[in-house]
Image (cartoon, rainbow, N blue to C red):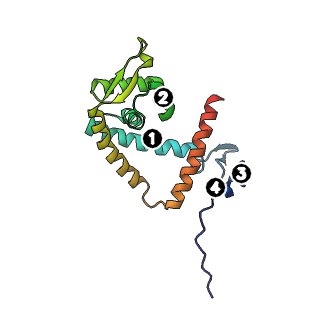
Amino acid sequence: MSETKAKPEVPVEAEYEKVDRRERYSSPTLRRNGRDVIDVANYVPYFFAAINNALSRGASLHYLEEFGVGIVEWRIIAMLAIEPRIPAARICEVVALDKSATSRGLKSLSEKDLVLFAEPSRDARRRIWWLSDRGYESHDKILEIALERERRLLQGVDPADLEITLRVMRKMRRNVRELATD
């Protein structure tokens, strides 16, 4: 009789808690000419950077050509659709943009009449931002394309693997916040 291997079930969160978090199955380094060097096939920050850079570059070119906004502006638009009437600092915090990029992006979007603001004081840093009607129209059109790009990115990825990956990335996102304060 031939044995068939059953497809492994997706482990529940509690099962992950039992894993020694210091261990990994692969090494982020390899030995080259007598010294340790990064192994790009197993170094997590490399993958995040490579995927993000490729996605951002492609999206930015597409959005600039079709809508006149780049990836930074798209991230601001997306954030203001999620949380309207927020200060620039909140955009920086959630979307992980630096203050100067956010400021330039908001200025550009304002000049295109895609965002509006209220200035509760003379301090521009205290401005409260939200999307204009044109901003929401742009959001809806860009979102359609962004979701199609995500669908194509995830083509061939098992839904259970995707959920595990998302769970791991959420944990790493929390860890990054702690690293930023070190």
Q: Amino acid at mark 4?
A: Glu
Q: Position of residue 175 (x, y in %)?
A: 62, 39
Q: CA distance from mark 2 to mark 3?
A: 35 Å
Density class for disc 4 (Cα within 10 Å; few <14, some 14-19, many ≥20) is few
Which of the marked residues, 2 or 3, is nearer the chain's N terminus? 3
Q: Position of residue 110 (x, y in %)?
A: 31, 24
Is 79 placed above or below 154 here?
above
- Kindly give the residue lying farthest to the top in the view shown: 122
Q: Which mark is residue 53?
A: 1
> What residue is rendered at 37% in x and 49% in y?
147
Residue 65 visible from this viewpoint = no
Q: Amino acid at mark 2?
A: Arg
Between label 3 and label 1, give the one nearer the viewer: 3
Is 3 placed above or below 128 here?
below
Q: Which mark is residue 148?
A: none
> What residue is rendered at 38% in x and 37% in y?
81
SS under mark 4: helix
Which of the marked residues, 3 or 1, is nearer the chain's N terminus? 3
SS under mark 3: loop
C-beta proximity under 8 Å, tags 3 and 1: no
Q: CA distance from mark 3 to mark 1?
A: 28 Å
Between label 3 and label 4, give the one nearer the viewer: 4
Residue designated by label 4: 13
> What residue is rendered at 35% in x and 23% in y?
117
Residue designated by label 3: 23
The N terminus lies in quadrant? bottom right
Q: Amino acid at mark 3?
A: Glu
Residue 79: name its quadrant.
Answer: top left
Q: Position of residue 119 (x, y in %)?
A: 38, 17
Q: Position of residue 113 (x, y in %)?
A: 27, 27
Residue designated by label 2: 90
C-beta proximity under 8 Å, tags 2 and 4: no
